[in-house]
Amino acid sequence: MREQSFYYWRKRLSEAEPVRFALVEAGTPVAEGRAPIELLLACGDRLHISPGADAATLRTVLSVLRERA
């Protein structure tokens, strides 16, 4: 890594919002060995994402959730 790159990322990461962590647990696989994703939100709501979910729609949903946080 170049020194300039190091300082760029150090500055960028220091200005970023704090990182939020999520507990990820392996669930029981469903049909075809693909497991759904379940997000447990801080408010207690659960978001289930099925295999093959539309990526654009998922990005929109996650964007809205970030704005509400």
Image: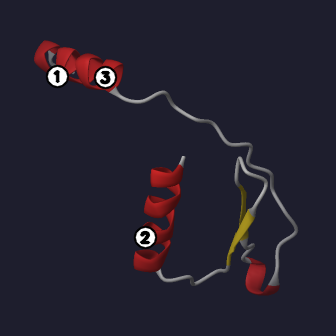
- Residue identified by numbered label 3: 15
What is the three-letter code of the residue carrying label 3?
Answer: Glu
Secondary element at image label 1: helix
Of labels 1 and 3, earlier in sequence is 1
Disc 2 + disc 1, Cβ < 8 Å: no
Closer to the observer: label 1 or label 3? 3
Q: Residue at x 82, y 73 (%)?
A: 29
Q: How is the image coloured?
A: secondary structure
Instruction: Tell me if mark 1 has few (under 14), some (14-19) or many (20+) residues whose alpha carbon lies within 10 angstroms of its own.
Output: few
Residue 59 higher or lower than 67, as above or below: below
Quadrant occupied by the N terminus? top left
In the rendered image, residue 8, in percent from the top left (x then y), is placed at: 18, 21
Dot label at residue 63: none
In the rendered image, residue 62, in percent from the top left (x then y), is placed at: 50, 62
Q: Residue at x 34, y 18 (%)?
A: 14
- Residue identified by numbered label 1: 5
Q: Which of 19/8 is in front? A: 19
Instruction: Tell me if mark 2 has few (under 14), some (14-19) or many (20+) residues whose alpha carbon lies within 10 angstroms of its own.
Output: few
Relative to residue 19, is residue 26 drawn left or right? right
CA–CA distance in space, label 2 to label 1: 31 Å
Of labels 2 and 1, earlier in sequence is 1
Q: Which of 27/22 is in front? A: 22
In the rendered image, residue 54, in percent from the top left (x then y), is placed at: 48, 83
Residue 36 higher or lower than 27, as above or below: below
Dot label at residue 60: 2
Secondary element at image label 3: helix
What is the three-letter code of the residue carrying label 1?
Answer: Ser
Q: Quadrant of residue 37?
A: bottom right
